[in-house]
Image (cartoon, rainbow, N blue to C red):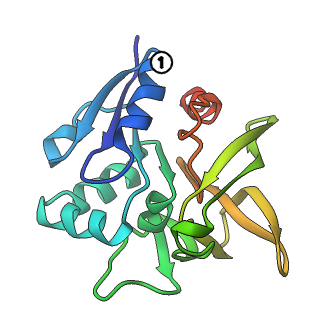
């Protein structure tokens, strides 16, 4: 049976994820309202503006259904702003910004600086029993500053004070600071799909 994967399509890098998923042969659906979650096998929360994603999700009545679906075991892959939106705490939230609280982590928004400090680098990502060297795009990327109990660190990069955490997994939620989809590399998505 072909899996059906939704991509949260309120704002941000929706098309890049849809292209990767289509290339992997899964059925896809844009998720904009609560009923779009029905029957999904997985959900991608893309990068974009985390505070905008939060506001739109709440205005469309989607925030609670997203939280409930993930709590019920829906696998989630979140990238960049998606990581911020899934965190329990933010070091530097925008005024009034809320999160889904799916991951017991604290995240700092824009930790890698603004757009002009964006960069690409190779990041080793733990996927099951193997490590994937991913050409990753860091675009105003967040950073995980605290990892709670039960959270697995799956990707780090060298930082000023040792290794900086840029990828985590807790239960069925996988979240990355960077964009693996920007370069058309499908391996992160494929490994995530293989996990459910």
Residue at image point 72% right, 66% down: 165
Q: Quadrant of residue 163?
A: bottom right
Element on which disc 1 rests? helix
Near-viewer residue (25 or 158): 158
Q: Position of residue 29 (x, y in %)?
A: 27, 31
Find residue 143 and report its horizontal and vertical position in percent.
Answer: 62, 71
Residue farthest to the top? 1
How many numbered marks are there? 1
Q: Which percent across, then down, holds residue 78?
A: 48, 51
Q: Quadrant of residue 95?
A: bottom left
**Side of 30 where 146 appears, left or right:** right
Residue appearing at x 56%, y 33% in the figure: 189
Rendered residue at 62%/36% (across/down): 188
Residue at 70 percent across and 58 percent down: it is 152
Q: Which residue is mark 1?
A: 23
Badge 1 crowding class, 10 Å Cα cut-off, few under 14, some 14 to 19, many 20 or more, is: few
Q: Is residue 134 left or right of residue 35?
A: right
């Amino acid at each position: 049976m072909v899996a059906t994967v939704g991509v949260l399509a309120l704002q941000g890098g929706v098309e890049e994820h849809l292209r990767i998923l289509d290339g992997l042969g899964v059925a896809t659906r844009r998720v904009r309202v609560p009923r779009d979650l029905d029957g999904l096998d997985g959900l991608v929360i893309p990068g974009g503006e985390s505070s905008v994603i939060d506001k739109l999700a709440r205005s469309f009545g989607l925030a609670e259904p997203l939280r409930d679906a993930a709590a019920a075991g829906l696998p989630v892959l979140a990238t960049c702003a998606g990581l911020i939106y899934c965190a329990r705490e933010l070091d530097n939230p925008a005024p009034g910004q809320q999160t889904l609280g799916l991951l017991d982590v604290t995240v700092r928004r824009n930790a890698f600086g603004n757009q002009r400090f964006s960069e690409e680098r190779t990041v080793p990502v733990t996927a099951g029993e193997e490590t994937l060297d991913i050409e990753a795009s860091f675009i105003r990327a967040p950073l995980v500053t605290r990892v709670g109990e039960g959270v697995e660190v799956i990707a780090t990069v060298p930082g000023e004070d040792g290794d900086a955490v840029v990828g985590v997994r807790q239960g069925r939620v996988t979240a990355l600071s960077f964009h693996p989809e920007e370069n058309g590399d499908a391996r992160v998505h494929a490994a995530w799909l293989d996990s459910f």
